[in-house]
């Protein structure tokens, strides 16, 4: 992902060279995710429930220079889930070709991805892609560190859920990745969740906290070379359907692999 053209050579020889920094860069990734959710509704007269499933998403990512950073375009090549995945296979299949757009600031901070095509399945799989692309920028050096706070709200009608996340990053080591020079960046974060979601038994209020950590790799020219994270959340769900809050524990794992 070059960021400088050979301006001196062009001036010295009269040769007209392309603006290399403006050339889009494309790479494919595989995103493997697993989620385990345990709900204990015994205090509300129910039972303990457990849901566990995994998915693999294959995407093509194109980065193109734009004012103040880089435009991110993500196209879904395919999505598949195991037999326990709550999203039906036909919905996953119909997500093929769905397009998402985002932005990577010069600081390296990515914005959230938003559907850019009228593909109904895109909304259902948006959560699978929302956090797969981390902070990246050229010239990261071992010892660099920074912090970030984000707030993302998903809304549908009168229902909305906001997730706030505070992250600490550190370029921890020079660590080759697949025979390429790279810096390994570590991330540790805390999160809070608050909002409402619809259920068959009426609106449910959700609140809670989470913690997570992981690491990923960035090449000297700022290319994202994959990584992995794990997050655990402790939530409480309440509503007219339960005499007292129902505890829910969620463990999410994500691994991103660049494809050749």
Image (spheres, grey):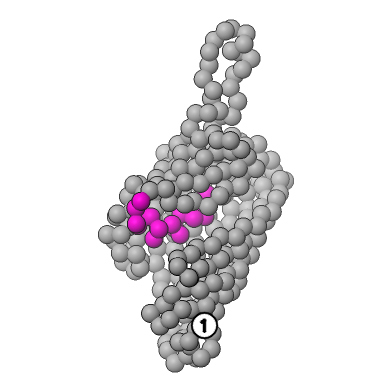
Q: Where is residue 219 in the image (x, y as percent from the top left)?
A: 58, 38
Residue 254 seen in the current view: yes
In magenta segment, residue 95: no
In magenta segment, residue 132: yes
Q: In this view, does 244 lie to the left or right of 168?
A: left
The residue furthest left is 90
Question: Local crowd at mark 1 within 10 Å, few (<14), some, or many (≥20)?
Answer: some
Q: Please determine whether, in this image, residue 152 is positioned above or below residue 16.
A: below
Q: Position of residue 218 (x, y in %)?
A: 58, 42
Residue 217 seen in the current view: no
Q: Is residue 253 left or right of residue 168?
A: left
Which residue is depicted at the point 48% across and 32% down? 24
At numbered mark 1, what does the secondary structure look like: helix, strand or loop?
strand
Residue on which disc 1 sits: 238
For the magenta stretch, what is the residue range?
Answer: 118-133
The residue furthest front is 157
Which residue is depicted at the point 41% across and 77% down? 199
Q: Where is residue 103 in the image (x, y as percent from the top left)?
A: 54, 44
Q: In front here: 136 or 179?
A: 136
Figure quadrant of the C terminus? top left
Which residue is depicted at the point 42% across and 48% down? 116
């Amino acid at each position: 992902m070059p960021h400088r053209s050979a301006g001196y050579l062009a001036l010295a020889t009269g040769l007209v060279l392309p603006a290399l920094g403006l050339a889009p860069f494309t790479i494919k990734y595989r995103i493997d995710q697993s989620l385990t959710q345990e709900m204990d509704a015994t205090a509300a007269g129910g039972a303990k429930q457990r849901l566990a499933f995994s998915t693999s998403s294959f995407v093509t990512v194109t980065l193109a220079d734009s004012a103040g950073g880089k435009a991110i375009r993500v196209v879904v090549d395919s999505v598949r889930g195991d037999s326990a995945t709550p999203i039906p296979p036909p919905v996953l299949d119909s997500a093929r070709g769905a397009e998402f757009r985002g932005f990577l600031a010069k600081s390296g901070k990515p914005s959230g991805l938003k559907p850019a095509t009228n593909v109904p399945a895109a909304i259902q799989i948006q959560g699978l892609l929302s956090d797969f692309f981390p902070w990246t920028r050229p010239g990261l050096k071992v010892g660099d560190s920074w912090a970030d706070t984000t707030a993302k709200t998903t809304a549908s009608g009168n229902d909305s859920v906001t997730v706030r996340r505070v992250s600490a990053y550190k370029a921890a080591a020079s660590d080759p990745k697949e025979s390429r020079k790279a810096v390994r960046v570590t991330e540790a974060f805390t999160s809070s969740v608050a909002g409402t979601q619809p259920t068959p038994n009426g609106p449910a209020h959700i609140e809670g906290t989470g913690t997570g950590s992981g690491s990923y790799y960035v090449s000297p020219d700022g290319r994202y070379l994959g990584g992995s994270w794990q997050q655990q959340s402790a939530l409480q769900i309440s509503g007219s359907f339960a005499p007292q809050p129902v505890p829910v524990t969620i463990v999410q794992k994500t691994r991103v692999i660049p494809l050749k």
